[in-house]
Image: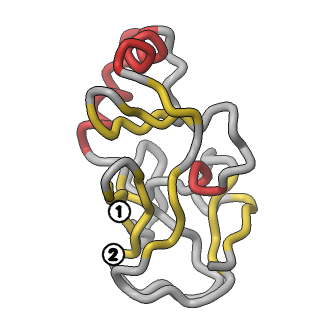
Amino acid sequence: MALIIKKSRLPGAGKGLYTTKAIGKDSKIIEYRGEIIGYNEYRKRTRNEQDHYLFFVRMDRSIDALHTPQYKARYANDAAGITRLKGVKNNSDYIIYGDKCFIVASRDIKAGEEIFVNYTSSYWSYMRKRTKKK
């Protein structure tokens, strides 16, 4: 898969993940990689608001991509997040296969498109509550 990082189309989102080649529906795009941590460390990082790149796999395994910018999956944004762009929708989902997490295309994606992945409504609900507390 030929993936590149450049400025996201979403306002204020920073960098985004783009494909240079067409991707078929249900294709694995990229593995979400980073530091593997257990539940206690996951909770600690969440409490300390160091959770922007955390992915919960199961009770004894989470992936934290905060300190691993070389892994490109962390740059995939959610088009249904706090900042949105009219007409832009997610085109992929996170899917867990055993111990690993992949971004998988939920529709055909054209060459040059940004990869937008569904972070889930529970993620955004949590982030909105946290923002309100501040």
- Which is nearer the eye, 70 or 133? 70
| Residue 127 in the image, given as x and y percentages of width and height | 38, 28
Identify which amino acid the numbered label 2 is placed on. Ser
Local crowd size for mark 2, using a 10 Å CA cut-off: few (<14), some (14–19), many (≥20): some
Disc on res. 93: 1
Residue 134 seen in this snapshot: no
Labelled pair 2, 1 in contact (Cβ < 8 Å): yes
Q: Residue at x 32, y 58 (%)?
A: 97
| Residue 89 in the image, given as x and y percentages of width and height | 39, 68
Q: Secondary structure at mark 1?
A: strand
Disc on res. 77: none
Q: Which residue is mark 2?
A: 106
The colour scheme applied to this rendered structure is secondary structure
- Which is nearer the eye, 41 or 72? 41
Q: Residue at x 49, y 25 (%)?
A: 51
Q: Secondary structure at mark 2?
A: loop
Local crowd size for mark 1, using a 10 Å CA cut-off: few (<14), some (14–19), many (≥20): many
Residue 74 seen in this snapshot: yes
- Which is nearer the eye, 60 or 57? 60
Vertical placement of 56 versus 90: above or below?
A: above
Screen quadrant of the C terminus: top left
Label total for image: 2
Specify which label sits upstream in the sequence, 2 or 1. 1
Screen quadrant of the N terminus: bottom right
Vertical placement of 28 versus 76: above or below?
A: below
| Residue 132 in the image, given as x and y percentages of width and height | 37, 17
| Residue 73 in the image, given as x and y percentages of width and height | 57, 55
Q: In whole angstroms, how far apart are the C-alphas of marks 2 and 1?
A: 6 Å
Left or right? Give the position of 81 relative to 30: left
Q: Residue at x 43, y 42 (%)?
A: 82
